[in-house]
């Protein structure tokens, strides 16, 4: 197993083959970085395996929790300030990091579209390079194995109106809960909205949240100067008091990005000081356009007062006119337009399933099923290709079986070490087909030639058909195994 050092400036990948043994992994006391002697098993249980992202004062790692039955993935965020912060900025950054832990503990365990908090802890370590002690702070939260909506638009283009309306509705439901607890998120944007493989939407990055005050005018405390450029409304950019309507404004800008694929700078007419997002080629129904326009009004009291009111309008009701939203103070958002940038979101390429009761069944649902099945299909076809090549070159059964066994072992080892992913397997199969095409002798196994004669197909086509059959067989086997595993865990969670 490879473990990543989390000491700033080191980031060495340390290999420990003995940790591939589950018993050793769960009983070993500690492992240290071979370069800087930094403890690698954080809080005695979390093993960082991949850097997910890095910001101005934080880094996020994908980690394994070795004390869970399924070796659950989680996100470990480390408070890691850059060297150009003054003491005031440093104190603010640390307070925001601590606040995210508090908010996740309060909100995540009560709403299944907000990540859960697993742990928050400091770590004192010696630095052999300076002879002094360093203190680091870590936050461990649920891993949402999905793709944020910013990356979705970058990869696939703008969403349809139906998709945007769904995102808007889901986010309004989440914000209704968040605002109902007296909190304001203050950093709604596409990169903080993540959709998993099952289509479930999550709201991430709560480092910017602060509790709301009792009502309008109840506090004169203003906003800090940290915000996401283009998504923050005028009151937040000016450092003034913020409200639930502040989040609704940012949500409307997010919807514009999802509809058009364009940034706020492209859609806002600075000369006339107004939004200019409706274009002839953009087809948006009038009711949805009217809702977005009202959410984008510059004065908070002119927008909808609450997420519930917007939901009522979207469902055919009428919102209150001119009702001022309750007051709330602010805290700084993540990934912003200032010197201080919060820790990155828990994002990754595969996608996770919705939360379900019971941690075991949740871990089973978190399996990237489509990727596993597709890679299984590629592996099955590769084994057929190489089996035919082995038998064609070495008709003696013992030799051909030995070669095939080595190939199978090599492919399995390479996949286990993640040297062979989907892309590499596709390349391997393509090169194998080209080799079979260029060297006919590689596919002269008598049984294949006989089958090709019976089917009246060219030998290479017959080989490819056999490979497809092998792929289907492997996929069926994996699917059956996953089904049995899922049923088994479903039974266990009921016991």
Image (cartoon, rainbow, N blue to C red):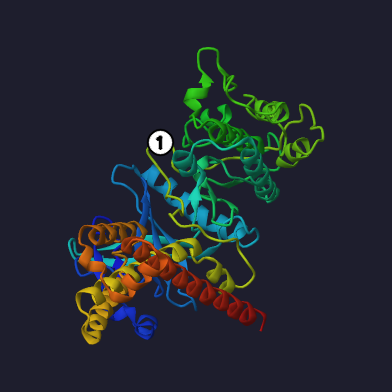
Judge the density around disc 1: few (<14), some (14-19), many (≥20) Cα neighbours within 10 Å: some
Q: Say which residue label 1 marks.
A: 338
Residue lying at 58% horizontally and 72% vertically, measured from the top left: 361
How far across and how far down the image is residue 194, in percent?
53, 50
Q: 406 left or right of 218? A: left
> Which type of secondary structure does the marked residue at label 1 adopt?
loop
- Tell me: residue 107, above or below residue 331: below
Name the one closer to the observer, 103 or 151. 151
How far across and how far down the image is residue 360, in percent?
56, 75
For residue 153, say whether it is visible.
yes
Residue lying at 76% horizontally and 26% vertically, measured from the top left: 322
Name the one closer to the observer, 127 or 289. 289
Q: In which quarter of the image is residue 327?
A: top right
Residue extending farthest to the right is 317
- Tell me: residue 96, above or below residue 64: above
How far across and how far down the image is residue 201, in percent?
59, 51
Residue extending farthest to the top is 272
Quadrant placement of the C terminus:
bottom right
Q: 371 left or right of 437? A: right
Name the one closer to the observer, 70 or 414. 414
- Tell me: residue 314, above or below residue 108: above
Quadrant placement of the N terminus:
bottom left
């Amino acid at each position: 197993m490879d473990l990543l050092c989390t000491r700033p400036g080191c980031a060495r990948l340390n290999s420990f083959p003995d940790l591939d043994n589950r018993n050793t992994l769960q009983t070993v006391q500690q492992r240290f970085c071979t370069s800087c002697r930094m403890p690698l098993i954080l809080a005695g249980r979390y093993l960082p395996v991949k850097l997910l992202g890095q910001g101005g004062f934080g880094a996020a790692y994908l980690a394994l929790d070795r004390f869970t039955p399924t070796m659950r993935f989680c996100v470990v965020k480390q408070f890691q300030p850059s060297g150009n912060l003054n003491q005031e900025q440093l104190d603010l950054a640390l307070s925001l990091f601590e606040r995210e832990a508090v908010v996740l503990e309060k909100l995540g365990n009560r709403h299944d579209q907000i990540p859960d908090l697993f742990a928050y802890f400091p770590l004192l370590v010696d630095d052999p390079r300076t002879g002094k002690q360093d203190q680091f702070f870590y936050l461990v939260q649920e891993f949402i194995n999905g793709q944020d909506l910013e990356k979705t638009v970058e990869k696939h283009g703008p969403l349809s109106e139906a998709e945007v309306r769904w995102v808007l509705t889901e986010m309004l439901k989440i914000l209704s809960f968040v605002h109902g607890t007296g909190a304001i998120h203050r950093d709604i944007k596409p990169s903080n909205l993540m959709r998993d493989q099952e289509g479930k939407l999550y709201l991430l990055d709560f480092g910017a949240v602060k509790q709301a005050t009792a009502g309008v005018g109840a506090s004169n405390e203003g906003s800090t100067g940290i915000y996401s450029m283009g998504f923050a409304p005028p009151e937040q950019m000016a450092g003034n008091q913020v409200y639930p309507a502040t989040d609704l404004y940012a949500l409307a800008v997010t919807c514009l990005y999802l509809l058009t694929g364009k940034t706020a700078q492209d859609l806002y007419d600075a000369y006339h000081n107004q939004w200019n997002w409706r274009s002839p080629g953009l087809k948006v129904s009038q009711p949805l356009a009217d809702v977005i326009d009202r959410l984008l009004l510059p004065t908070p009291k002119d927008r909808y007062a609450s997420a519930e009111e917007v939901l009522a309008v979207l469902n055919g009701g009428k919102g209150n006119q001119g009702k001022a939203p309750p007051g709330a103070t602010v805290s700084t958002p993540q990934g912003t337009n200032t010197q201080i940038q919060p820790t990155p979101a828990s994002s990754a390429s595969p996608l996770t399933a919705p939360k379900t009761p019971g941690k075991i069944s949740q871990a089973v649902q978190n399996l990237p099923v489509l990727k596993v099945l597709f890679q299984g299909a590629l592996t099955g076809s590769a084994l057929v290709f190489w089996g035919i090549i082995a038998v064609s070159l070495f008709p003696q059964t013992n030799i051909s079986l030995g070669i095939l066994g080595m190939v199978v072992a090599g492919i399995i080892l390479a996949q286990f070490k993640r040297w062979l992913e989907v892309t590499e397997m596709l390349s391997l199969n393509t090169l194998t087909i080209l080799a079979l095409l260029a060297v006919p002798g590689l596919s002269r196994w008598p049984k294949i030639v006989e089958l090709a004669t019976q089917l009246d197909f060219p030998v290479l086509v017959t080989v490819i058909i056999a490979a497809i059959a092998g792929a289907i067989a492997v996929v069926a086997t994996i699917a059956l195994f996953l089904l049995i595993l899922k049923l088994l865990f479903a039974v266990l969670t009921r016991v």
